Image (cartoon, rainbow, N blue to C red):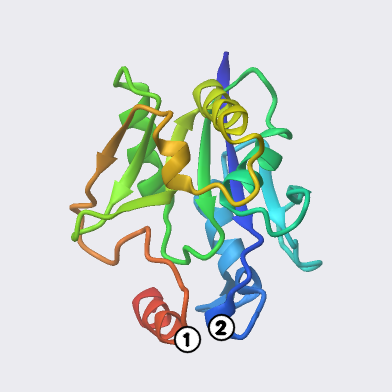
Amino acid sequence: MGGFAAVVLAGGAARRMGGADKAAIPVAGQSMLTRVLAAVHDADPQVVVGRVPPDLPVEVASTSEEPRGGGPVAATAAGLALVPEDVSFTALLAADLPLLTGEAIDVLRLTVESAPMQGALYRDAEGRRQTLCGVWRTAALREAVAKLAEERGGLHGASMHALLEHLRFIEVSWRRPGPPPWFDCDTDDDLRTAEEWAR
């Protein structure tokens, strides 16, 4: 066992942004998806669940959840299907995290590798879990998805919080200067804030 993969979920509806393809929206000159993939540049494979822009500067594996619109857990299952069984750790990330850095991913990876836990994710200053900014033991994440599917009779509409109930994980606080790596862009105001921080 060994290795590190990344599954990036890029299939959200972006209703609060007029249905835009959020992952393709640029922040500081690069699409949000490109910025997220740069933070996990050493992941192999890099799997994108959702639309992949034709001008994406890196090569990725791509897939989509079936049926489309199944939600983040269904998308996670689709992405994991492209991660080889022998990969030890998988980053599970949203595609709209333009401030994510390799350092932030390294903190999560080292936390999981050094603790008897199944994963680590960030917690913001208000104590909210950032469910799509984490690193997991791949086998444990796959098993939790399977358990939830069995429990519900499928994954369509399943929430990340329901998935987390099947996992043991550490919540990590970001204590370094600078913008929080889990900052996601759900509105035009969020985009403007990310643009200011990125500069």
Tally of numbered tags: 2
Whether residue 120 can be seen here: yes
Q: Does residue 33 lie above or below 92 as drawn?
A: below
Between the C-alphas of marks 2 and 1, the distance is: 7 Å
Do the residues under discs 2 and 1 have CB atoms within 8 angstroms?
Answer: yes
**Nearest to viewer (mark 2 / mark 1):** 2
Name the one closer to the observer, 35 or 120: 120
x 32%, y 40%: residue = 107
Q: Residues within 10 Å of mark 1 (few under 14, many from 20)?
A: few
Tell me the quarter of the image containing the C terminus: bottom left
Identify residue type, mark 2.
Met
Picture coordinates of residue 180 (x, y %)? 30, 62
Q: Secondary structure at mark 1?
A: helix
Q: Does residue 81 lie above or below 32 as drawn?
A: above
Tell me the quarter of the image containing the N terminus: top right
x 42%, y 55%: residue = 101
Identify residue type, mark 1.
Asp
Q: Does residue 112 lie above or below 135 as drawn?
A: above
Residue to which mark 2 is pinned: 17
Residue 23's disc number: none
